[in-house]
């Protein structure tokens, strides 16, 4: 299951490029962003599914759909520095930042 703010468009995009690979993948719109998707199918609305539904050993009620935004906010203060680093140093910096903030 892929949950993101633009899952409806992402779903169309991946099915045009790799339909067999994504044929059994579920796409749902993040709870926070669904209100901006008036023209999208209600099937993309994560709230339409029971909170007790099990996905990868986690129920939908337990699923943190804001994880990407939270990690991006966490890494915001090192964004400029990382932009000027070599790949290995950038990865190490991200790992240290996440470890210090208990995001491992």
Image (cartoon, helix red, strand yellow):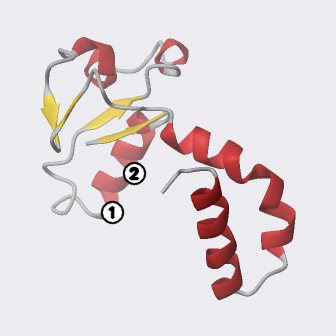
When asked about the image quadrant of residue 82, the answer is bottom right
Position above or below: 29 against 104? above
Q: Which mark is residue 33?
A: none
Position above or below: 43 against 67? above
Q: Is residue 87 left or right of residue 24?
A: right
Please give the name of the residue rendered at 19% of the width and 63% of the height, measured from the top-left corner. Answer: 21
User: What residue is pinned by disc 1?
Assistant: 17
Q: Which mark is residue 13?
A: 2
Q: Nearer the viewer, residue 57 or 33?
A: 57
Question: Badge 1 local density, few (<14 within 10 Å), some, or many (20+)?
Answer: few
In space, the residues marked 2 and 1 are separated at their CA atoms by 7 Å
When asked about the image quadrant of residue 86, the answer is bottom right
Q: Secondary structure at mark 2?
A: helix
Please give the name of the residue rendered at 30% of the width and 26% of the height, measured from the top-left corner. Answer: 62
Please give the name of the residue rendered at 64% of the width and 87% of the height, measured from the top-left corner. Answer: 88
**Residue 3: x %, y % from top left:** 37, 37
Please give the name of the residue rendered at 33% of the width and 63% of the height, measured from the top-left corner. Answer: 17
Q: Is residue 9 left or right of residue 17?
A: right
**Residue 102: x %, y % from top left:** 55, 50
Do the residues bearing badges 2 and 1 touch, measured as CB atoms within 8 Å? yes
**Residue 30: x %, y % from top left:** 44, 27
Q: Nearer the viewer, residue 65 or 12?
A: 65
**Residue 60: x %, y % from top left:** 25, 26
């Amino acid at each position: 299951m892929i949950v993101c703010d633009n899952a409806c468009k992402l779903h169309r995009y991946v099915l045009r490029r790799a339909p067999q690979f994504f044929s059994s993948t579920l796409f749902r719109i993040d709870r926070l962003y669904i209100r901006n998707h008036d023209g999208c199918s209600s099937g993309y609305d994560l709230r339409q599914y029971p909170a007790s539904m099990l996905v990868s050993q986690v129920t939908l009620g337990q699923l943190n759909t804001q994880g990407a935004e939270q990690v991006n906010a966490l890494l915001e203060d090192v964004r400029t520095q990382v932009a000027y680093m070599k790949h290995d140093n950038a990865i190490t910096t991200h790992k240290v930042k996440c470890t210090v903030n208990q995001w491992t």
